[in-house]
Image: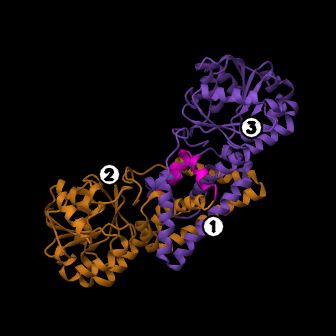
Chain colours: A orange, B purple
Amino acid sequence: MRFQRLALIGCGLMGGSFALALREAGLVQTIVGFSASEKTRQRAVELQVIDQACASVAEAVQGADLVLLAVPVGAMHSSFAAMRDALQATALLMDVGSTKCDVIAAAQATLGERLSCFVPAHPIAGKEVAGIEHAEAALYKERRTILTPLPQTSIHKMQAAHEVWTAIGSHVSTMTPEAHDATFAAVSHLPHLLAFAAVNALTAQPQGPAFLDMAGPGFRDFSRIAASDASVWRDILSANHAEVLTQIAHFRAALEQFENTLKQGNTAALQQLIQQASDVRSAWTLQAGNACNTASED
Amino acid sequence: MRFQRLALIGCGLMGGSFALALREAGLVQTIVGFSASEKTRQRAVELQVIDQACASVAEAVQGADLVLLAVPVGAMHSSFAAMRDALQATALLMDVGSTKCDVIAAAQATLGERLSCFVPAHPIAGKEVAGIEHAEAALYKERRTILTPLPQTSIHKMQAAHEVWTAIGSHVSTMTPEAHDATFAAVSHLPHLLAFAAVNALTAQPQGPAFLDMAGPGFRDFSRIAASDASVWRDILSANHAEVLTQIAHFRAALEQFENTLKQGNTAALQQLIQQASDVRSAWTLQAGNACNTASED
């Protein structure tokens, strides 16, 4: 498997790292890139992440046998629309978005008969720092990548997608888009939202800064993900809002149980609630493939 | 400053580490210990953490010029009552509890004129593993210890307490008991409760185990404190329930703001809420003195 031309739509951390990984693995001849920012395009050339900058999505996609869409979730729809007429029937098209149902809806609304080229992908990797400067060939190594094919997705494209991610060291899983979005609402999107809310709850109090001065490593680790990028997480939470609201409801119910035992002074029930959480969390370990990645996009 | 006889009431991680640290610093001649469990007392002797095991609190405290009460918060009251008649007027008495108002109330209800000997202390240190086996002389080094004196606390005892903790490498701060409990409700007790509730919310769903399989490092760090000891945290949350309930109310208000922006599809307001949290958390750093300690008791 070797690609003639990779078109990178979005030259940031995720796209840049994919380009570097493919080049390192000898899987690609030429890499072209488009970014909405002229400056970012030029920087991607200077850093030798891409061979050539293109002035439009259509120009980049022209003649490409591999297209990676690595733009914020909110910019997927316009990117699909912009590439549609230029996309070759033989091309493999993938995204790297953290939510899948919304990206698929955008693809379905725009790609027409080219929908069969599209393999929705979510590599569970990232960094707390964004931008092409931080791109690295090893970003996807030993990380899990989830593919969520559509009924229309070509089996050959699905196989090629599997091979590409495997070739750059990622562990590939397949899920339905719905299961993907429900799962990540529960284990990633809700925790981020809770961490954001916990920090805001502190800030809302006059003593907030004094409180924060006394915070220790428990707070540090619990709130680490609250430092994530605001526009990235606005897009993720908005795109997956239905599943996130469902998870908030589950969380509220669990929180109320604690609140009730505290109000009632029911220490036996309180201990049971804590024990249940402690047992589950103590038995849990990070799965190989989910390991080693960092905060912003997990 | 050198003590003739340290009486350790409670021979666990916290008490054992204090004993080892004092011995290493050459601050004490003899260490005796009491633990409710005969087995633990014997183990403390075998491990040479204490020189002699005592069969009762009163026997341990007899003739001691330094008494450290290192029992679970829920056992403070009975321990104070048991030592009262044996406690020397010249002794320095300290606890190491994670909450202070309730410990002080127990002391006020039991100690009588010996109340002046008592300097309430909270060393912000711990480990995720409990027990005398894990005790180490360095546990309090470079950690913060907060003293919350009562109006009745002797100024000399306060000074001696400051010297002891400083001598074993801890950074000493002073707060009122009320400010202490409000602060730790906000930066430690609430985060623990939220982490417990988040894990229980997952477990309550049929897909919980499948969800957990896909969880990554964001979840790992966010939920680390949910693995904490259930009886320890039952006592802490119960003892400080009023402040914890106040913090839950602040958190609920912050959570509702997120929920409302998601329901309304107000992405601008959502981004603003995230940005606020991200800015505060990005600017925050662990204060020297709060650093390096681990989860269970911060």
Of callouts 3 and 1, which one flags the residue occurring earlier in the amino acid sequence?
A: 3
For residue B253, the mark is: 1
Which residues are drawn in magenta?
Answer: A206-225
Kindly indicate whether the residues beneath marks 2 and 3 are on one polypeptide chain.
no
Q: Tell whether label 3 touches label 2 (CB within 8 Å).
A: no
Is residue B154 visible to us here? yes
Q: Residue at x 36, y 55 (%)?
A: A127
Residue A81 falls in image quadrant: bottom left
- The residue tagged 2 is A142
Query: Residue A211 magenta-drawn?
Result: yes
Point out residue A73 in the picture as x, y percentages from the top left corner. 37, 72
Q: Residue at x 47, y 59 (%)?
A: B279
Q: CA distance from mark 3 to mark 1?
A: 34 Å
Query: Residue B51 magenta-drawn?
Result: no
Chain holding disc 3: B
Q: Is residue B280 above or below residue A62?
A: above
Residue A87 falls in image quadrant: bottom left
Chain holding disc 1: B
How many neighbours does mark 2 have within 10 angstroms: few (below 14), some (14-19), or many (20 or more)? many
For residue A46, the mark is: none
How many neighbours does mark 3 have within 10 angstroms: few (below 14), some (14-19), or many (20 or more)? many
Q: Residue at x 27, y 59 (%)?
A: A132
Q: Circle 1 sits in a helix, a strand or a loop, which is it?
A: helix
Amino acid at dot 1: Ala
Quadrant of the drawing holding the C terminus of chain B: top right
* Overall secondary structure of the magenta section: helix
- The residue tagged 3 is B149
Kindly indicate whether the residues beneath marks 2 and 1 are on one polypeptide chain.
no
